[in-house]
Amino acid sequence: MSHPFSLSPPEHAALALYDLVWRMATPLLRRNARLSEGFEQRTLQQRLPAADLWIQAASAGESYLVSEILKTLRPPYPIRVLMTSNTRQGVEILQRVATENASRDRYAGVAVAYFPFDRPGLMKKAVEQVRPRLMVLAETEIWPGLLTALRRFGSRTVLVNGRMSPGSLRGYSLWPALLRKLGPDRVLAVSPDDAGRFGQLFGRERVSVMSNIKFDRIRPGEAASDRYRALKRLLPDAPFLVLGSVRHDEAGPVEKMLCRIRQACPQAVTGLFPRHLHRTAYWKARLDAHGIPWVLRSHLSKPVTAGSVILWDTFGELASVYRLAGAAFVGGSLGTFGCQNFLEPLTCGLMPVIGPCRNHFEWVGTEIFDRGLVRMGEDWQAVSALLTADLENPRPRRAVLAAVKKYLSARQGGTVRACELIEGALCK
Protein backbone atom coordinates (compact mmCIF):
# COMPACT_ATOMS: atom_id res chain seq x y z
CA MET A 1 0.00 0.00 0.00
CA SER A 2 1.28 3.45 -0.86
CA HIS A 3 1.93 5.90 1.95
CA PRO A 4 -0.64 8.70 2.46
CA PHE A 5 0.24 11.67 0.31
CA SER A 6 -0.29 15.38 0.78
CA LEU A 7 1.98 18.37 0.34
CA SER A 8 2.32 21.49 2.45
CA PRO A 9 2.17 24.94 0.80
CA PRO A 10 5.99 25.33 1.00
CA GLU A 11 6.40 21.91 -0.63
CA HIS A 12 3.97 22.86 -3.40
CA ALA A 13 5.97 26.05 -3.91
CA ALA A 14 9.26 24.12 -4.06
CA LEU A 15 7.90 21.78 -6.74
CA ALA A 16 6.50 24.74 -8.69
CA LEU A 17 9.94 26.35 -8.65
CA TYR A 18 11.50 23.03 -9.73
CA ASP A 19 9.00 22.92 -12.62
CA LEU A 20 9.88 26.48 -13.63
CA VAL A 21 13.61 25.71 -13.67
CA TRP A 22 12.98 22.74 -15.96
CA ARG A 23 10.80 24.88 -18.26
CA MET A 24 13.56 27.46 -18.58
CA ALA A 25 16.28 24.85 -19.09
CA THR A 26 14.53 22.62 -21.63
CA PRO A 27 15.23 24.76 -24.74
CA LEU A 28 18.90 24.86 -23.76
CA LEU A 29 19.01 21.10 -23.25
CA ARG A 30 18.17 20.56 -26.90
CA ARG A 31 21.56 22.06 -27.77
CA ASN A 32 23.33 19.42 -25.70
CA ALA A 33 24.66 16.69 -27.99
CA ARG A 34 23.74 13.86 -25.62
CA LEU A 35 20.36 15.17 -24.45
CA SER A 36 19.23 16.10 -27.95
CA GLU A 37 19.10 12.38 -28.74
CA GLY A 38 15.54 11.21 -28.15
CA PHE A 39 14.44 14.78 -27.42
CA GLU A 40 10.91 14.15 -28.73
CA GLN A 41 10.50 11.28 -26.26
CA ARG A 42 12.15 13.20 -23.43
CA THR A 43 9.60 16.01 -23.90
CA LEU A 44 6.63 13.68 -24.66
CA GLN A 45 6.19 14.94 -28.20
CA GLN A 46 6.02 11.19 -28.78
CA ARG A 47 3.46 9.49 -26.56
CA LEU A 48 4.64 6.83 -24.10
CA PRO A 49 2.89 3.44 -24.29
CA ALA A 50 0.70 2.15 -21.48
CA ALA A 51 2.37 -0.44 -19.23
CA ASP A 52 1.72 -2.40 -16.06
CA LEU A 53 5.41 -2.24 -15.11
CA TRP A 54 7.66 0.75 -15.80
CA ILE A 55 11.38 0.25 -15.15
CA GLN A 56 13.81 3.17 -15.16
CA ALA A 57 17.55 2.61 -15.64
CA ALA A 58 19.83 5.64 -15.73
CA SER A 59 22.40 4.38 -18.22
CA ALA A 60 24.20 1.31 -19.52
CA GLY A 61 25.13 -0.28 -16.19
CA GLU A 62 21.61 -0.10 -14.81
CA SER A 63 20.18 -1.34 -18.12
CA TYR A 64 22.17 -4.55 -17.79
CA LEU A 65 20.53 -5.03 -14.39
CA VAL A 66 17.13 -4.68 -16.04
CA SER A 67 18.13 -7.46 -18.42
CA GLU A 68 18.71 -9.78 -15.46
CA ILE A 69 15.38 -8.81 -13.92
CA LEU A 70 13.34 -9.49 -17.05
CA LYS A 71 15.01 -12.86 -17.58
CA THR A 72 14.16 -13.91 -14.02
CA LEU A 73 10.80 -12.21 -13.39
CA ARG A 74 7.70 -14.42 -13.19
CA PRO A 75 4.75 -12.00 -12.96
CA PRO A 76 1.37 -13.30 -11.76
CA TYR A 77 -0.18 -12.54 -15.17
CA PRO A 78 1.11 -11.44 -18.61
CA ILE A 79 2.22 -7.84 -18.14
CA ARG A 80 3.09 -4.93 -20.39
CA VAL A 81 6.55 -3.54 -19.67
CA LEU A 82 8.02 -0.12 -20.43
CA MET A 83 11.77 0.32 -19.97
CA THR A 84 13.34 3.79 -20.05
CA SER A 85 16.86 5.18 -19.82
CA ASN A 86 18.53 8.59 -19.84
CA THR A 87 21.27 7.74 -22.35
CA ARG A 88 21.58 6.39 -25.87
CA GLN A 89 23.78 3.55 -24.62
CA GLY A 90 21.14 2.60 -22.06
CA VAL A 91 18.35 2.74 -24.63
CA GLU A 92 20.31 0.54 -27.04
CA ILE A 93 20.83 -2.11 -24.37
CA LEU A 94 17.16 -1.98 -23.40
CA GLN A 95 16.16 -2.40 -27.03
CA ARG A 96 18.14 -5.64 -27.11
CA VAL A 97 16.49 -6.68 -23.84
CA ALA A 98 13.08 -5.98 -25.38
CA THR A 99 13.89 -8.14 -28.40
CA GLU A 100 15.10 -10.98 -26.18
CA ASN A 101 11.89 -10.94 -24.13
CA ALA A 102 9.27 -10.02 -26.73
CA SER A 103 8.22 -13.63 -27.38
CA ARG A 104 7.98 -14.69 -23.74
CA ASP A 105 4.41 -15.56 -22.74
CA ARG A 106 4.73 -13.74 -19.42
CA TYR A 107 5.05 -10.40 -21.23
CA ALA A 108 2.12 -8.95 -23.16
CA GLY A 109 4.46 -6.35 -24.64
CA VAL A 110 7.91 -4.86 -24.01
CA ALA A 111 8.60 -1.26 -25.07
CA VAL A 112 11.60 1.08 -24.76
CA ALA A 113 11.83 4.88 -24.64
CA TYR A 114 14.03 7.69 -23.43
CA PHE A 115 13.25 8.80 -19.88
CA PRO A 116 11.26 12.06 -19.87
CA PHE A 117 12.73 15.20 -18.37
CA ASP A 118 11.74 15.43 -14.71
CA ARG A 119 9.65 18.60 -14.95
CA PRO A 120 6.70 17.86 -12.62
CA GLY A 121 4.08 18.93 -15.17
CA LEU A 122 5.69 16.75 -17.82
CA MET A 123 5.99 13.77 -15.48
CA LYS A 124 2.32 14.07 -14.55
CA LYS A 125 1.49 13.68 -18.23
CA ALA A 126 3.97 10.79 -18.58
CA VAL A 127 2.47 8.84 -15.70
CA GLU A 128 -1.04 9.45 -17.03
CA GLN A 129 0.06 8.02 -20.39
CA VAL A 130 1.81 4.95 -18.97
CA ARG A 131 -0.60 4.33 -16.06
CA PRO A 132 1.81 1.92 -14.33
CA ARG A 133 0.69 -0.40 -11.56
CA LEU A 134 4.31 -0.52 -10.44
CA MET A 135 7.38 1.66 -11.00
CA VAL A 136 10.80 0.04 -10.53
CA LEU A 137 13.80 2.34 -10.09
CA ALA A 138 17.30 0.92 -10.51
CA GLU A 139 20.05 1.94 -8.09
CA THR A 140 19.71 5.72 -7.39
CA GLU A 141 16.96 7.03 -9.65
CA ILE A 142 15.35 9.54 -7.28
CA TRP A 143 13.45 12.08 -9.41
CA PRO A 144 11.09 14.43 -7.50
CA GLY A 145 8.87 15.12 -10.51
CA LEU A 146 8.41 11.43 -11.27
CA LEU A 147 7.87 10.44 -7.64
CA THR A 148 5.28 13.20 -7.17
CA ALA A 149 3.35 12.07 -10.25
CA LEU A 150 3.44 8.43 -9.16
CA ARG A 151 2.15 9.30 -5.69
CA ARG A 152 -0.70 11.36 -7.10
CA PHE A 153 -1.65 8.64 -9.57
CA GLY A 154 -1.51 5.92 -6.89
CA SER A 155 1.20 3.77 -8.47
CA ARG A 156 3.41 1.69 -6.22
CA THR A 157 7.16 2.36 -6.41
CA VAL A 158 10.12 0.17 -5.48
CA LEU A 159 13.84 0.88 -5.76
CA VAL A 160 16.10 -2.16 -6.25
CA ASN A 161 19.85 -2.63 -6.21
CA GLY A 162 19.91 0.65 -4.33
CA ARG A 163 23.14 2.58 -3.91
CA MET A 164 23.62 5.92 -2.19
CA SER A 165 26.91 7.66 -1.46
CA PRO A 166 27.35 9.99 1.53
CA GLY A 167 27.56 12.90 -0.91
CA SER A 168 24.27 11.97 -2.56
CA LEU A 169 22.63 11.70 0.85
CA ARG A 170 23.76 15.23 1.72
CA GLY A 171 22.26 16.53 -1.50
CA TYR A 172 18.95 14.73 -1.11
CA SER A 173 18.73 15.77 2.56
CA LEU A 174 18.22 19.44 1.69
CA TRP A 175 14.47 18.80 2.04
CA PRO A 176 14.13 15.49 3.91
CA ALA A 177 10.44 15.83 4.80
CA LEU A 178 9.46 16.19 1.14
CA LEU A 179 11.51 13.23 -0.05
CA ARG A 180 10.17 11.05 2.75
CA LYS A 181 6.66 11.76 1.44
CA LEU A 182 7.66 11.11 -2.17
CA GLY A 183 10.01 8.18 -1.58
CA PRO A 184 9.53 4.60 -2.81
CA ASP A 185 7.29 2.19 -0.94
CA ARG A 186 10.21 -0.24 -0.63
CA VAL A 187 13.96 -0.01 -1.10
CA LEU A 188 16.35 -2.94 -1.51
CA ALA A 189 19.89 -1.64 -0.95
CA VAL A 190 23.10 -3.46 -1.82
CA SER A 191 24.90 -3.01 1.51
CA PRO A 192 24.14 -2.17 5.13
CA ASP A 193 25.81 1.23 4.68
CA ASP A 194 23.66 2.03 1.64
CA ALA A 195 20.59 0.78 3.50
CA GLY A 196 21.40 3.09 6.40
CA ARG A 197 21.60 6.11 4.11
CA PHE A 198 18.34 5.23 2.35
CA GLY A 199 16.79 4.72 5.79
CA GLN A 200 17.80 8.22 6.87
CA LEU A 201 16.13 9.61 3.78
CA PHE A 202 12.96 7.53 3.45
CA GLY A 203 12.55 5.80 6.82
CA ARG A 204 14.22 2.59 7.96
CA GLU A 205 10.97 0.65 7.85
CA ARG A 206 10.98 0.81 4.06
CA VAL A 207 14.55 -0.43 3.55
CA SER A 208 16.08 -3.92 3.37
CA VAL A 209 19.40 -5.31 2.14
CA MET A 210 19.90 -7.47 -0.96
CA SER A 211 22.87 -8.93 -2.80
CA ASN A 212 23.98 -6.79 -5.71
CA ILE A 213 22.50 -7.94 -9.03
CA LYS A 214 25.88 -7.24 -10.61
CA PHE A 215 27.15 -10.39 -8.90
CA ASP A 216 24.48 -12.36 -10.79
CA ARG A 217 25.81 -10.98 -14.07
CA ILE A 218 29.18 -12.57 -13.40
CA ARG A 219 28.99 -15.96 -15.08
CA PRO A 220 32.57 -17.22 -15.14
CA GLY A 221 33.59 -19.37 -18.06
CA GLU A 222 30.56 -18.87 -20.29
CA ALA A 223 30.91 -20.26 -23.82
CA ALA A 224 32.44 -17.97 -26.42
CA SER A 225 29.89 -16.04 -28.46
CA ASP A 226 29.83 -15.30 -32.18
CA ARG A 227 30.80 -11.72 -31.29
CA TYR A 228 33.84 -13.00 -29.40
CA ARG A 229 34.95 -15.13 -32.34
CA ALA A 230 34.48 -12.24 -34.77
CA LEU A 231 36.54 -9.92 -32.58
CA LYS A 232 39.28 -12.51 -32.16
CA ARG A 233 39.81 -12.53 -35.92
CA LEU A 234 40.62 -8.81 -35.78
CA LEU A 235 43.59 -9.22 -33.43
CA PRO A 236 47.14 -10.21 -34.36
CA ASP A 237 49.29 -12.66 -32.41
CA ALA A 238 50.39 -10.04 -29.91
CA PRO A 239 49.66 -9.07 -26.29
CA PHE A 240 46.30 -7.32 -25.95
CA LEU A 241 45.58 -4.59 -23.39
CA VAL A 242 42.13 -3.17 -22.67
CA LEU A 243 41.64 0.32 -21.23
CA GLY A 244 37.96 0.07 -20.40
CA SER A 245 35.41 2.82 -19.76
CA VAL A 246 37.95 5.66 -19.56
CA ARG A 247 36.37 8.84 -18.23
CA HIS A 248 37.26 12.39 -19.28
CA ASP A 249 38.64 13.39 -15.88
CA GLU A 250 41.34 10.70 -16.02
CA ALA A 251 42.35 11.18 -19.65
CA GLY A 252 45.71 12.73 -18.71
CA PRO A 253 46.90 9.89 -16.46
CA VAL A 254 45.61 7.25 -18.88
CA GLU A 255 47.46 8.95 -21.73
CA LYS A 256 50.72 8.81 -19.75
CA MET A 257 50.00 5.22 -18.79
CA LEU A 258 49.46 4.18 -22.40
CA CYS A 259 52.75 5.75 -23.47
CA ARG A 260 54.69 4.04 -20.68
CA ILE A 261 53.19 0.61 -21.37
CA ARG A 262 53.95 0.98 -25.08
CA GLN A 263 57.60 1.61 -24.21
CA ALA A 264 57.72 -1.64 -22.23
CA CYS A 265 55.54 -3.69 -24.63
CA PRO A 266 55.82 -2.04 -28.05
CA GLN A 267 54.07 -4.91 -29.86
CA ALA A 268 50.99 -4.84 -27.62
CA VAL A 269 47.65 -3.95 -29.18
CA THR A 270 45.50 -1.65 -27.04
CA GLY A 271 41.71 -1.48 -27.06
CA LEU A 272 40.80 2.01 -25.81
CA PHE A 273 37.18 2.40 -24.71
CA PRO A 274 36.08 5.98 -23.86
CA ARG A 275 33.30 5.91 -21.26
CA HIS A 276 31.31 8.32 -23.44
CA LEU A 277 31.49 7.89 -27.20
CA HIS A 278 31.50 11.63 -27.90
CA ARG A 279 35.04 11.68 -26.44
CA THR A 280 36.35 9.72 -29.43
CA ALA A 281 37.48 12.92 -31.19
CA TYR A 282 39.60 13.89 -28.18
CA TRP A 283 41.41 10.57 -28.25
CA LYS A 284 42.01 10.76 -32.00
CA ALA A 285 43.84 14.05 -31.46
CA ARG A 286 45.86 12.81 -28.48
CA LEU A 287 46.96 9.60 -30.20
CA ASP A 288 48.01 11.62 -33.25
CA ALA A 289 49.97 13.99 -31.01
CA HIS A 290 52.01 11.05 -29.69
CA GLY A 291 52.43 9.46 -33.10
CA ILE A 292 50.56 6.35 -31.99
CA PRO A 293 48.89 4.43 -34.84
CA TRP A 294 45.17 3.93 -34.31
CA VAL A 295 42.07 2.68 -36.08
CA LEU A 296 38.40 3.14 -35.27
CA ARG A 297 36.61 -0.05 -34.32
CA SER A 298 33.77 0.87 -36.71
CA HIS A 299 36.28 0.88 -39.61
CA LEU A 300 37.94 -2.40 -38.68
CA SER A 301 37.46 -5.34 -41.06
CA LYS A 302 40.86 -7.08 -40.95
CA PRO A 303 43.49 -7.75 -38.27
CA VAL A 304 45.19 -4.66 -36.90
CA THR A 305 48.93 -4.15 -36.93
CA ALA A 306 50.81 -5.09 -33.77
CA GLY A 307 51.51 -2.04 -31.62
CA SER A 308 48.43 -0.10 -32.72
CA VAL A 309 45.46 1.20 -30.76
CA ILE A 310 41.86 0.25 -31.54
CA LEU A 311 39.75 3.26 -30.60
CA TRP A 312 36.36 1.81 -29.76
CA ASP A 313 33.60 3.99 -31.19
CA THR A 314 30.91 1.30 -31.00
CA PHE A 315 28.97 0.14 -27.97
CA GLY A 316 28.26 -3.26 -26.46
CA GLU A 317 31.51 -5.15 -27.13
CA LEU A 318 33.53 -4.50 -23.98
CA ALA A 319 32.47 -7.73 -22.25
CA SER A 320 33.55 -9.83 -25.24
CA VAL A 321 36.82 -7.92 -25.57
CA TYR A 322 37.74 -8.63 -21.94
CA ARG A 323 37.72 -12.33 -22.85
CA LEU A 324 40.48 -11.69 -25.38
CA ALA A 325 42.73 -9.48 -23.25
CA GLY A 326 45.84 -10.35 -21.33
CA ALA A 327 45.54 -7.25 -19.14
CA ALA A 328 42.80 -4.75 -18.38
CA PHE A 329 42.44 -1.39 -16.67
CA VAL A 330 38.95 -0.38 -15.54
CA GLY A 331 38.29 3.33 -15.94
CA GLY A 332 36.97 5.91 -13.54
CA SER A 333 39.48 4.74 -10.96
CA LEU A 334 42.21 7.25 -11.87
CA GLY A 335 39.77 10.15 -11.74
CA THR A 336 37.51 11.51 -9.05
CA PHE A 337 34.02 10.54 -10.24
CA GLY A 338 34.21 6.86 -9.38
CA CYS A 339 35.23 3.50 -10.74
CA GLN A 340 33.34 1.64 -13.45
CA ASN A 341 32.39 -2.02 -13.09
CA PHE A 342 35.59 -3.90 -12.26
CA LEU A 343 33.64 -7.14 -11.75
CA GLU A 344 32.94 -7.58 -15.46
CA PRO A 345 36.46 -8.68 -16.50
CA LEU A 346 36.29 -11.47 -13.95
CA THR A 347 33.65 -13.23 -16.07
CA CYS A 348 36.40 -14.27 -18.49
CA GLY A 349 39.10 -15.12 -15.98
CA LEU A 350 40.83 -11.76 -16.29
CA MET A 351 41.94 -10.07 -13.07
CA PRO A 352 41.67 -6.32 -13.71
CA VAL A 353 43.72 -3.42 -12.41
CA ILE A 354 42.18 -0.21 -11.08
CA GLY A 355 43.43 3.09 -9.71
CA PRO A 356 42.88 4.37 -6.16
CA CYS A 357 39.33 5.70 -6.63
CA ARG A 358 36.62 3.08 -6.28
CA ASN A 359 33.65 5.29 -5.47
CA HIS A 360 30.36 3.53 -6.30
CA PHE A 361 31.98 0.15 -5.57
CA GLU A 362 32.64 0.37 -1.84
CA TRP A 363 29.78 -2.13 -1.44
CA VAL A 364 32.06 -4.85 -2.83
CA GLY A 365 34.21 -4.66 0.29
CA THR A 366 37.92 -5.45 0.57
CA GLU A 367 37.98 -9.24 0.29
CA ILE A 368 38.09 -9.15 -3.50
CA PHE A 369 41.36 -7.17 -3.21
CA ASP A 370 42.69 -9.33 -0.39
CA ARG A 371 42.27 -12.38 -2.63
CA GLY A 372 44.06 -10.63 -5.49
CA LEU A 373 41.11 -10.94 -7.85
CA VAL A 374 41.28 -7.18 -8.43
CA ARG A 375 44.53 -5.23 -8.05
CA MET A 376 44.71 -1.55 -7.12
CA GLY A 377 47.52 0.85 -8.02
CA GLU A 378 47.96 4.04 -6.01
CA ASP A 379 48.66 6.15 -9.12
CA TRP A 380 49.06 5.82 -12.89
CA GLN A 381 52.67 4.69 -12.54
CA ALA A 382 51.69 1.80 -10.25
CA VAL A 383 48.79 0.85 -12.52
CA SER A 384 51.16 0.87 -15.51
CA ALA A 385 53.55 -1.49 -13.74
CA LEU A 386 50.79 -3.96 -12.88
CA LEU A 387 49.41 -3.94 -16.43
CA THR A 388 52.86 -4.39 -17.95
CA ALA A 389 53.49 -7.40 -15.71
CA ASP A 390 50.17 -8.92 -16.78
CA LEU A 391 50.97 -8.43 -20.46
CA GLU A 392 54.36 -10.09 -20.02
CA ASN A 393 53.02 -12.96 -17.89
CA PRO A 394 49.27 -13.49 -18.41
CA ARG A 395 47.59 -15.33 -15.56
CA PRO A 396 46.03 -18.76 -16.28
CA ARG A 397 42.34 -18.17 -16.95
CA ARG A 398 41.18 -21.49 -15.50
CA ALA A 399 42.81 -20.79 -12.15
CA VAL A 400 41.34 -17.29 -12.07
CA LEU A 401 37.87 -18.61 -12.95
CA ALA A 402 38.03 -21.17 -10.15
CA ALA A 403 38.91 -18.45 -7.64
CA VAL A 404 36.13 -16.20 -8.96
CA LYS A 405 33.50 -18.95 -8.65
CA LYS A 406 34.51 -19.57 -5.06
CA TYR A 407 34.28 -15.87 -4.25
CA LEU A 408 30.85 -15.51 -5.89
CA SER A 409 29.20 -18.55 -4.36
CA ALA A 410 27.99 -16.66 -1.28
CA ARG A 411 27.20 -13.39 -3.04
CA GLN A 412 24.66 -14.16 -5.74
CA GLY A 413 20.86 -14.20 -5.61
CA GLY A 414 20.07 -10.49 -5.72
CA THR A 415 18.03 -10.78 -8.91
CA VAL A 416 15.73 -13.38 -7.36
CA ARG A 417 15.27 -11.17 -4.28
CA ALA A 418 14.37 -8.15 -6.43
CA CYS A 419 11.98 -10.18 -8.57
CA GLU A 420 10.19 -11.54 -5.51
CA LEU A 421 9.55 -7.96 -4.39
CA ILE A 422 8.35 -6.93 -7.86
CA GLU A 423 6.08 -9.96 -8.24
CA GLY A 424 4.54 -9.34 -4.83
CA ALA A 425 3.93 -5.67 -5.62
CA LEU A 426 2.22 -6.55 -8.91
CA CYS A 427 -0.23 -8.74 -6.99
CA LYS A 428 -1.39 -5.84 -4.80
Image: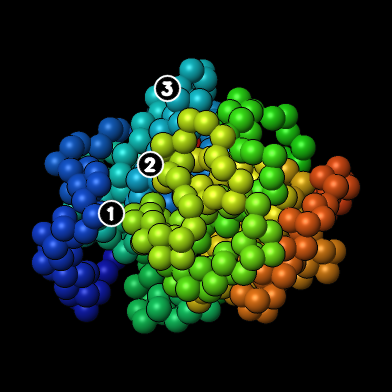
What residue is disc 3 on? 108
Side of 62 where 371 appears, left or right: right
SS state under label 1: loop
- Residue 197 in the figure: left or right of residue 18: right
**Viewer-nearest residue: 262 or 327:** 262
Amino acid type at image mark 1: Arg
Front of the two marks 2 and 3: 2
Give the number of the disc on residue 91. 2
Spatial CA span between label 2 and label 3: 20 Å
Above or below 129: residue 176: below
Secondary structure under tag 2 reads helix
Query: x and y percent of residue 373 in the render?
Result: 79, 59
Name the residue type under label 2.
Val
Q: Residue at x 50, y 76 (%)?
A: 336
* Secondary structure found at label 3: strand
The residue mark sitting in front, 1 or 2, is 1
Mark 2 or mark 3: whose residue is earlier in sequence: 2
Q: Is residue 337 visible?
A: no
